[in-house]
């Protein structure tokens, strides 16, 4: 019998690392000075984290501190209008920039015991020092990404849409090499 | 690859996340229209080109995106110190380096 070249999805269940493109979410960039932070936190229903890499969560909303005055918001798509309206409501009291980026980026999930090993083919960070629950902006093979660590063996990568084919293809090549035991 | 300490992230991170941004502590003239051509040329183009400790700007462009300052030895490529933008220029003696 000839060797089958068909992709065996059932075998993926036991794979050392899996890569999957995730469904769209609402994404916002928030820039606000110190004086406006409390008001924006109240509007969004959580305290804005102050340390770069920290994530605050409320329900399915996650707010990541990217820089000293910059945050990234992820939420279910259904909350898009509510988030924009919440910002507009406090604008007079707390001037800020709240920009929707939902269509700018796509996300991949990288999970499994070899998830960190797979990411290390493109990310120069010491991933052992990125604690579960945290996230950082960094690079993956020279494309800027936001890397979320959801668990010891679970990561997400947000990447600009135009870089996604490059990042996705490299992740898939690495996944295949790890699966082949290379 | 160099490892660079970002004073805003307070972490030591790979060079691939950073961009070099020229010599630090170059003060923009308050009233450029009063400058002679020579003074304007010096402001725009003339740099110290140090051999040894050099005060320079870096940007954590693929991280917190902040500009900050560093003292780097241009011979060994060793970073002696990084500090936030706007902080006073540290003297070399405080870094244990002979001026
Ligand atoms: Zn930084």
Image (cartoon, coloured by chain):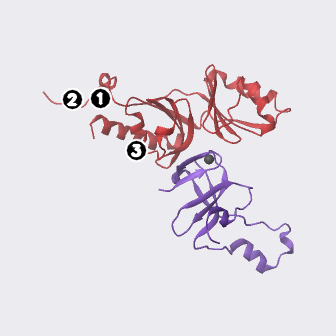
Q: Residue at x 66, y 74 (%)?
A: B48
What residue would you read off at disc 1? A7
On the same chain, marks 1 and 2? The answer is yes
Q: Secondary structure at mark 1?
A: loop
Say if B65 sits above or below A119 in the image.
Answer: below
The 10 Å Cα crowd at callout 2, few under 14, some 14 to 19, many 20 or more, is few
Q: Chain of mark 2?
A: A
Q: Tell me whether circle 1 and circle 2 mark residues in contact (CB < 8 Å).
A: no
**Can you tell which quarter of the image residue A104 is in?**
top right
What residue would you read off at disc 2? A4
Q: Chain of mark 1?
A: A
Counting from the top left corner in percent of width and height, residue A53 is at: 60, 37
Q: Quadrant of the C terminus of chain A?
A: top left
Q: Tell me whether circle 1 and circle 3 mark residues in contact (CB < 8 Å).
A: no
Q: Colour of chain A?
A: red
Give me the disc on residue A121: 3
Counting from the top left corner in percent of width and height, residue B86 is at: 75, 56
């Amino acid at each position: 019998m000839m060797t089958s070249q068909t992709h065996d999805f059932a075998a993926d269940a036991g794979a050392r690392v899996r890569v999957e493109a995730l469904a769209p979410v609402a994404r916002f960039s928030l820039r606000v000075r110190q004086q406006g932070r409390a008001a924006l936190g109240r509007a969004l229903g959580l305290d804005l984290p102050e340390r770069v890499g920290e994530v605050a969560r409320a329900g399915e909303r996650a707010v990541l501190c990217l820089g000293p005055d910059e945050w990234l918001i992820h939420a279910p798509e259904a909350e898009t209008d509510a988030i924009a309206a919440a910002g507009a409501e406090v604008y007079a009291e707390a001037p800020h920039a709240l920009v929707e980026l939902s269509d700018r980026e796509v996300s991949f999930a990288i999970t499994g015991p070899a998830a960190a090993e797979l990411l290390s083919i493109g990310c120069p960070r010491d991933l052992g020092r990125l604690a579960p629950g945290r996230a950082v902006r960094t690079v993956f093979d020279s494309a800027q990404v936001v890397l979320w660590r959801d668990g010891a063996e679970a990561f997400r990568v947000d990447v600009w849409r135009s870089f996604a084919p490059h990042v996705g293809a490299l992740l898939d090549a690495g996944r295949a090499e790890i699966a082949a035991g290379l | 690859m160099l490892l660079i300490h970002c004073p805003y992230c307070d972490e030591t991170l790979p060079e691939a996340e950073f961009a070099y941004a020229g010599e630090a502590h170059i003060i923009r003239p308050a009233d450029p229209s009063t400058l002679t051509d020579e003074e304007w040329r010096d402001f725009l183009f003339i740099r110290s080109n140090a051999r040894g400790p050099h005060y320079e700007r870096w940007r954590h462009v693929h991280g917190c995106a902040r500009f900050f300052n560093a003292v780097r030895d241009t011979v060994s490529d060793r970073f002696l110190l990084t500090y936030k933008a706007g902080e006073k220029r540290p003297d070399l003696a405080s870094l244990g380096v002979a001026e």
